[in-house]
Image (cartoon, rainbow, N blue to C red):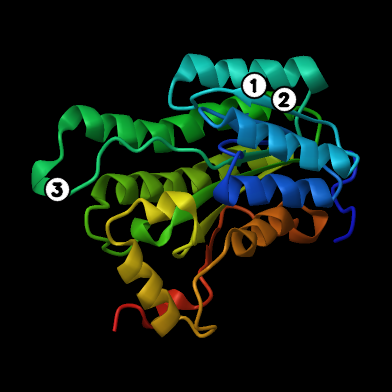
Amino acid sequence: MDQALHGKTALVTGSSRGIGRAIALKLGALGADVAVNYVTREREAGEVVAALAALGRRAFATRADVSRLDELGGLFDRVAAEWGGLDIYVNNAIDVASFGPVTRLRPDSWRHTIDSHVTTFLVGSQRAAKLMAGRTGTIVALSSLGSRTYVPGYAAIGVGKAAIEALTRYLAMELGPSGIRVNTVSAGPIDTDALRQFATYDQMKEASIRHSPARRMGQPDDVADVVAFLCTHGARWICGQTLVVDGGFSLLSAH
């Protein structure tokens, strides 16, 4: 896949750290120019841009809270101003305002969490599709195993992820005739700063090591490599799918 994305432009939301950062750098390594999105981590976003520039890629960082539709729109306006079009959109960033048992979830924070998943994905994909007009475009969203299995305290996030997976199928069918493929990558536990904030992090890490055939926890690059592959011509016949990328964790984790 060396330079498989040469000449392509990409936008990766939430790409100053973790999985988003790994995706941005992988796309850049394959030849794509990348727009780096962040909310609070300006320095880290700048570091990603510098790393991409060192690869010879065009890159810029732009601040936007994608859970706010006005800021999400401004993000795509910036991409349009810089590049005039877009080839790859990776919907990675979310904003979680609701975590805990379902009996204690509050409607306002629930709505915000769901909206930051599925409404952001919907509107972002609509805007991306406009910038992909006349091109062969790729949209990839990020999900997690909590969309289909029980994770304590994860109800709002899990429902939001499940909605992303459902919307993927509808977007794939309706955008496909325009030459745009849409897929989702559902990741198992990945060792990131965000995951370490969960109270159940230690249990998830121990379970990953115990149940995964590789006997280790997933790393951001494990997911980034699959997302990047989905953006290449080699994945041209993969459309409307949710690919589970968990190192086999889910094969035994329920036992």
Q: Against 86, is 191 above or below?
A: below
Amino acid bearing label 3: Val
Q: Secondary structure at mark 2?
A: helix
Q: Looking at the image, which is closer to me, 212 or 228?
A: 212
Amino acid type shown at disc 2:
Leu
Q: Are the residues at dot 2 and dot 3 in contact (C-beta closer than 8 Å)? A: no
Amino acid on which the number 1 mark rests in the picture: Phe
Q: Which mark is residue 131?
A: 2
Question: Which numbered dot is residue 76?
Answer: 1
- Between marks 2 and 1, how big is the CA–CA gap? 8 Å
Q: Residues under labels 3 and 1: Cα distance? A: 35 Å
**Residue 102's mark?**
3
Contact flag, marks 3 and 1 (Cβ < 8 Å): no
Residue at image point 76% right, 48% down: 27
Which image quadrant for residue 129?
top right
Work out which quarter of the rendered image holds the C terminus and state it. Answer: bottom left
Report the residue at 47% width, 19% height from top: 69
